[in-house]
Amino acid sequence: MSAVGNAFVGRLRSLVEKIVNVNPIRYLVNWSKLYSLWPVHLTTACCSVEFGAANCPRFDIGRMGVAAFFGSLRQCDLIIIEGTVTKKMAKRVKKIYSQMPSPRYVIAMGACAISGGLFYNSYNIIKGVDKILPVDVYVPGCPPRPEALAHAVLLLQDKIRKGRVNITKGE
Amino acid sequence: MSSMYFSVGPQHPGSGHFRMKITLQGDIILNAEPDPGFVHRSVEKIAETREYLQNVPLIERQCLSDVSSVTLAYAMGIEELLGIEVPPRAQYIRVIMCELSRIMSHLYWLAILGIFVGHSTMFMWGFGDRDILITETAEKIAGARVSYSYIIPGGVRYDLPDGIKEHTMKTLDYFQGRLKEYDAIFFSNPIFKRRTKGVGVLSRSEAIRLGVTGPTLRGSGVRGDIRKDAPYAAYDELDFEIPVYSEGDSYSRSLVRFREMKISSSIIRQAFENLPEGDFKVKTRKKVPEGEVFSRVEAARGELACYLISDGTRKPYRLKMSTPSFRNLPGFSLMKGSMLADMPPIYMSLDYWPLETDR
């Protein structure tokens, strides 16, 4: 693209950012993000059993606007860290997070994702996923019940509505 | 024709915490190399730093879909070292919990297999029935949904609650009807048969050579089951059969698990009918005498062995677990020479659980 074109796109972007920050429009934008949270299908450890149960008929967090997780990574805006993150997995978690478009949200599920949990003195784990990613909602439990995960989704939606999430810009 | 290399996972709808490196030529898989180790949490090393009872919740995290069998192998080892006799009531309750775990694990597998071959109904039914029928029964008995540290050295933690027999019988009656519906909609489904029959054939001699275990072994015509070969708990007093199919393809491995769910229900019924009165736990000492012990059980995925060395203190000197998923890992060589679309049924028919492999 030519230099003139670049300048035009830059101006357009700053204009859009200004418009989005106007109060009623910002409310509308935040509201539109609420009910279209698409989680990445990334299972890091054993909390995936309860995550699977939460997506299925009895608990069904889909009715809260968390769509089924078959989208591509480029369409996802929510990453649920299900349990322990080992050193080998941490590289992949960071890579996957960096591939997601902004705005993106993180839920840390289970004691291991919060602080290491039962495996606190292991040599191969990251003690708390907040050391590598900005976490929005923590869900305690080992493993948390599916209801707890549903509550976490509601808390995250509340945070988005009020505009209090960790905003990290995509590259 | 030039070949193509790509990796499946760890971020992939079907892979879980696991990666496969696949070399493809056209539509044929030339080489499929598993890459485990994404969830190595050093369970065996941590176990050396904790007391014997504290290790029960730790080791059950390695297989959260089938927790009872893992803790049972560990508890049996300690009981042998301590030289204590577990009361018969505890033995029967252990059988009930192990079989409930087996059904839970198989339903989880069935649901995921359903979505792998594009059958969403089976996915929803499998998970729904698992939660509403089996997990709830286990929760009523043990007090937690999946991670109940119920089986401990010396017996079980609590006695059975009141009215659990009637509840379980009612649940199993309903579950029998559901199994018939599974058969009608899924296992007799011509599309499912076409996707799995003759796919990923593992011959009898090859199965023995690779050392696979559990339903993968029984799907290849080998009658190998620890519940019959070296009976533990109360299995020698109960009457049940071992399903064996000789075709060795993905369909026969699936049928083994499907029939095991039916047989597990009948084992639970018998255990409730013959449930003896008495204690559910005996007192154990915290210090375990010196010695080495080897104990094994039949978990949902196959033979699970536990090797324990004690040096006479409150903590184990060494704990080594040999898990069925690790032993089924060579089975991924079945993918060589098959089509790419056959990869999901072969992967799922081995019922691979990465946490159990990496520990």
Image (cartoon, helix red, strand yellow):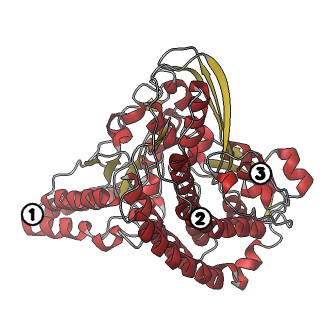
- Answer whether labels 1 and 2 touch (C-beta < 8 Å): no
Residues at marks 1 and 2, CA–CA distance in whole angstroms: 69 Å
Residues at marks 3 and 2, CA–CA distance in whole angstroms: 35 Å
Left/right placement of residue B93 relative to residue B2 reads left
Q: Which amino acid type is shown beneath numbered disc 3?
A: Gly
Residue count near mark 3 (Cα–Cα under 10 Å), binned few <14, some 14–19, many ≥20? many
Q: Which of marks 3 and 2 is nearer the N terminus?
A: 2
Q: Position of residue B129 (x, y in %)?
A: 48, 72
Q: Which chain carries label 1?
A: A
Q: Position of residue B253 (x, y in %)?
A: 74, 64
Q: Depth check: give the residue in front, B157 or B275.
A: B275
Mark 3 vs mark 2: give the one in front: 2
Q: Which chain carries label 3?
A: B
Residue count near mark 1 (Cα–Cα under 10 Å), binned few <14, some 14–19, many ≥20? few
Residues behind callouts 1 and 2 on a single chain? no
- The residue labelled by disc 2 is B270
At x 24%, y 62%, the residue is A12
Query: Relative to A76, is B151 above or below?
Result: above
Left/right placement of residue A37 relative to residue B243 reads left
Q: Where is residue B239 in the image (x, y as percent from the top left)?
A: 70, 62
Q: Depth check: give the residue in front, B44 or B149.
A: B149
Q: Residue A22 carries which label?
A: 1
| On-image quarter of the N terminus of chain A | bottom left
- The residue labelled by disc 3 is B331
Q: Which amino acid type is shown beneath numbered disc 2?
A: Gln
Q: Which chain carries label 2?
A: B
Q: Which amino acid type is shown beneath numbered disc 1?
A: Val
Query: In the rendered image, is residue A43 in sight?
Result: yes
Element type where label 2 sits in the image: helix
